[in-house]
Image: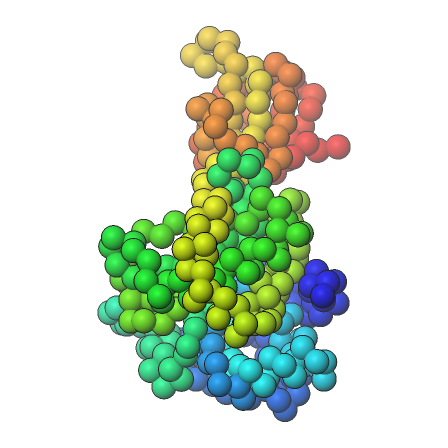
């Protein structure tokens, strides 16, 4: 099965870019056939509907949710691409429908999605509200946990461009975690069940993005959704969709979310039996997945000559793109964020200044938080971090 070809073929063209809200998904939901059950499972702080999508009649129940953080839409796009495959009379769709009952919340935080913020309208991070459940969106998710009683949960997120896979010099395009269930971060059957599925996804994804699959940090915090759910005995997998080379809108990254979802459900029962016979090997394989590492900046400029306090010196500096919502679109604005002590970091784009002199409207030395608009030798012009031709 060429899963990358399927991911491309079933990509939903109506959902593009980094701004995905209820308004964008409603028409796509309406296009799904009657094998899907679409409902409103609750409302947000601002009374926006929280949609639920149910598919299949199988005995194995999986609950998944995306955009718990409103500004993390890549997994939502990948989820809808997966729905698009299930919205066919293919053998794959029939097999999944017969084996599983999927209950999916495409956008758990519709207020945050509309405002393009991590938090909800009360400025609460829903992924730190699992225990106290103060927010209406958190109560929706807790209610589904209690009524649907899933056998497995998928917690779908985006991660920033700062993450790479440790020791590879490559971006972490997709990362996984089998969350801890206690402070000691021990492994029990609940975590091992999640680990087995992660290992299978990793094996398939390595065919397409070798060394770009990461293992997310497993520090325990019972207020985090995945940690809480694992602690009550339900295997949970954290998905973190990250950066792919030159893919700031994450149209490539969404393909790997699709592949991961499809892989997780194919031959599920057979692999579950295999895991029970090979727990130690499964754990070893999981721990071989490179750890996520904060080792990237979007832009790094090396060998830059500057004037600082009337002293000429050579520096390296870095810029990072801020994502700003402007008129219903996300604008990427490069801001200077670090100067020197960057030897251990890589840039998604690296520029060798070749000892040319830095200058900007505000002076001859880069300043933190300033836009990355500057000149080298007063002739090479950089606008929004990149050379202006």
- Tell me if I can see residue 161 in this picture: no
Front residue of this view, candidates 330 and 299: 299
The scheme the figure's colours follow is rainbow
Front residue of this view, candidates 54 and 361: 54
Give the x, y percent position of residue 36: 59, 86
Question: Is 40 positioned to the left or the right of 80 in the image?
Answer: left
Residue 8 against residue 247 in the figure, above or below: below
- Tell me if I can see residue 90 in this picture: yes
Front residue of this view, candidates 305 and 254: 254
Residue 5 against residue 150 in the figure, above or below: above
Question: Is 88 positioned to the left or the right of 307 in the image?
Answer: right
What is the number of callouts on the image?
0
Give the x, y percent position of residue 256: 62, 58
Q: Which residue is drawn at 65% across and 84% down?
A: 94
Give the residue furthest to the front. 277
For the C terminus, the quadrant is top right
Q: Residue at x 58, y 55 (%)?
A: 203
Q: Residue at x 45, y 40 (%)?
A: 294
Q: Which residue is drawn at 32% across and 71% down?
A: 233
Give the residue furthest to the top. 311
Residue 66 against residue 358 in the figure, above or below: below
Front residue of this view, candidates 116 and 62: 62
Give the x, y percent position of residue 202: 56, 55
For the N terminus, the quadrant is bottom right
Quadrant housing residue 126: bottom left
Give the x, y percent position of residue 314: 52, 14
Residue 193 against residue 149 in the figure, above or below: above
């Amino acid at each position: 099965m060429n899963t990358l070809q399927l991911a491309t073929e079933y990509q939903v063209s109506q959902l593009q870019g980094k701004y995905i809200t209820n308004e964008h998904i409603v028409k796509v939901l309406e296009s799904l056939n009657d094998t899907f059950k679409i409902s409103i499972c609750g409302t947000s702080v601002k009374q926006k509907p929280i949609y639920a999508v149910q598919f299949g009649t199988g005995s194995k129940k999986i609950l998944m949710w995306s955009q718990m953080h409103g500004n993390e839409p890549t997994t939502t796009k990948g989820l809808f691409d997966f729905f698009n495959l299930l919205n066919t009379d293919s053998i794959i769709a029939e097999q999944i429908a017969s084996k599983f009952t999927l209950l999916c919340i495409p956008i758990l935080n519709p207020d945050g999605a509309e405002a393009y913020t991590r938090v909800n309208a009360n400025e609460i991070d829903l992924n730190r509200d699992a225990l106290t459940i103060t927010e209406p969106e958190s109560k929706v998710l807790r209610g589904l946990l209690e009524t649907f009683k899933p056998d497995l949960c998928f917690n779908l997120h985006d991660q920033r461009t700062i993450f790479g896979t440790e020791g590879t010099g490559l971006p972490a395009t997709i990362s996984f975690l089998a969350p801890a269930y206690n402070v000691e971060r021990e492994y029990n059957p609940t975590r091992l069940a999640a680990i087995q599925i992660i290992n299978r996804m990793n094996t398939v994804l390595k065919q397409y993005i070798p060394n770009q699959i990461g293992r997310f940090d497993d520090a325990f915090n019972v207020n985090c959704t995945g940690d809480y759910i694992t602690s009550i005995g339900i295997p949970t997998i954290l998905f973190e969709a990250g950066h792919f080379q030159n893919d700031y809108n994450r149209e490539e990254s969404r393909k790997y979310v699709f592949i991961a979802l499809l892989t997780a459900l194919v031959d599920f029962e057979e692999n579950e039996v295999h895991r029970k016979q090979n727990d130690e090997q499964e754990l070893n394989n999981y721990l071989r997945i490179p750890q996520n590492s904060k080792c990237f900046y979007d832009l790094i400029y090396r060998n830059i000559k500057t004037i600082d306090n009337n002293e000429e010196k050579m520096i390296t500096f870095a810029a990072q793109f801020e994502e700003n919502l402007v008129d219903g679109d996300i604008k990427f604005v490069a801001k200077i964020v670090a100067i020197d002590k960057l030897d251990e970091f890589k840039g998604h784009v690296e520029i060798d200044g070749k000892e040319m002199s830095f200058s900007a409207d505000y002076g001859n030395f880069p300043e933190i938080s300033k836009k990355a608009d500057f000149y080298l030798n007063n002739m090479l012009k950089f606008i929004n971090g990149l050379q202006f031709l």
